[in-house]
Amino acid sequence: MKMINYKDCYQLNNGLQIPCMGFGTYNAKDGDNREIIGTAIKAGYRYFDTASLYGTERDLGAAIRESGIPREEFFIVSKVWIDEMGYEEVKKAFAASLERLQMDYLDLYLIHWPRKSEDDTEWKKRLTMTWLAMEELYDTGKVRGLGLSNFLPHHIEVLMHNAKIKPVVDQLEIHPGYSQEAAVAYCKANNIQVQAWSPIGRSALLTNPYMMSLAEKYHVSVAQLCLRFLIQKGIIPLPKASTMERMKQNQDVFGFDISEEDMWILTCMPQNLWLGEHPDFAVPTATSEGKNEI
Ligand SMILES: NC(=O)c1ccc[n+]([C@@H]2O[C@H](COP(=O)([O-])OP(=O)(O)OC[C@H]3O[C@@H](n4cnc5c(N)ncnc54)[C@H](OP(=O)(O)O)[C@@H]3O)[C@@H](O)[C@H]2O)c1
């Protein structure tokens, strides 16, 4: 189904509707998270991505309350961090997220990161117990869908081996220069909706000469080109921006089409614009969420 604006929705594998574009709340500039999120609400965003790691849950909850718009009009996603995983631990982490947000349910709750390192021999057991507890949370109705982030096919296979409930999404670093085709194809084949973090690749992509010339050809900005690329691939981008102008610009990506040839070119660009850590070998820190800070 073709999305015609940023409020259009995909249907997840449990029937839940999810907007085709969200707003990222990680690392909002100068600590002004609440104000930036408030501006994003005024810009029209209703789908917000947060995580216990980001330290933005309180500001997100406050900005939503200040907006006066009913909670049900928002789509709120949070994540359990790796050191909060485990059967009892995730239940506590979930309650703490709701408490910080001052909400009584989440739209999605994701496992943020699958594994600590290649020496992490406990990861499969930890994952299975965490998911079991999350399934129980789902059964209570306090979360409308369960999902994953930074999970590669072999991590998802481990999860699915014991899972009763299938993940509805996988949130991965995806942008031109790091298109993660293998993980995307696996998710599509298994009806797991893919979402893209760092969809505009932070500054490395914004100043890439090839991207700049291609954006000029379509009379758009590099950020818009990146977001359109993901929309045409059926991937949900989660851009973060600090000004109303950029927030609006990022929503304005439904009035042009990237040609099939250029889509292939963007998909097959050298895969050297990777920003994050590898989910089998390292865990990002709370301050960087990746090896390169913005
Ligand atoms: N699951 C995970 O492991 C994970 C990891 C990282 C991020 N995330 C999620 O993904 C979200 C987005 O990722 P991100 O913040 O790393 O990267 P991003 O959205 O790709 O890039 C954000 C950067 O792009 C700039 N920008 C935004 N719109 C622009 C425009 N139209 N023109 C020029 N510059 C523009 C922003 O600047 P200003 O802010 O100054 O406007 C900021 O420096 C996060 O907020 C978070 O919710 C998830």
Image (tube, grey):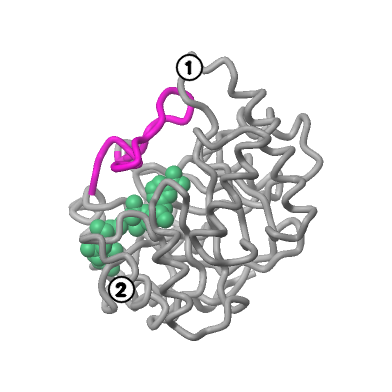
Give coordinates of residue 107: x percent, y percent. Answer: 63, 62
Q: Which mark is residue 130?
A: none
Q: Amino acid at mark 1?
A: Glu
Q: In percent of the image, x 64 and y 31: which residue is there?
A: 127
Q: Which residue is label 2 attached to?
A: 35
Residue at 31% x, 71% y: name it: 36
Q: Is the residue marked by circle 1 packed among few (<14), some (14-19), or many (20+) residues within 10 Å?
A: few
| Secondary structure predominantly adopted by residues drawn in magenta | loop
Q: In this orientation, does residue 200 appear?
A: no
Q: Where does residue 129 sit, x and y in percent of width and height?
A: 70, 31
Q: Secondary structure at mark 1?
A: loop
The reply to whether residue 284 is visible in this rendering is: yes
Percent of width and height locating residue 18: 61, 66
Q: Please, is residue 60 above or below residue 151 in the view?
A: below
Is residue 279 a member of the stretch shown in magenta?
Answer: yes
Cα separation between marks 2 and 1: 40 Å
Q: Position of residue 281 (x, y in %)?
A: 43, 23
- Which residue appears at 37% of the width and 35% of the height? 284
Q: Please state which of residues 250 and 62 is positioned toward the viewer in this rendering.
A: 62
Question: SS of the residue at dot 2?
Answer: helix
Residue 118 numbered tag: 1
**Is label 1 within 8 A of ligand 1 (CB to nearest ligand atom)?**
no
Q: Which stretch appears magenta?
A: 273-294
Residue at x 38%, y 81% (from the top left corner): 43
> Which is more toward the observer, 182 or 141?
141
Residue type beneath disc 2: Glu
Classify residue 13 by image quadrant.
bottom right
Ligand 1 quarter of the rendering: bottom left
Q: Nearer the viewer, residue 281 or 74?
A: 74
Position of residue 199 in the picture relative to residue 279 (left or right): left
The image shows residue 79, relative to residue 116, as above or below, that is: below
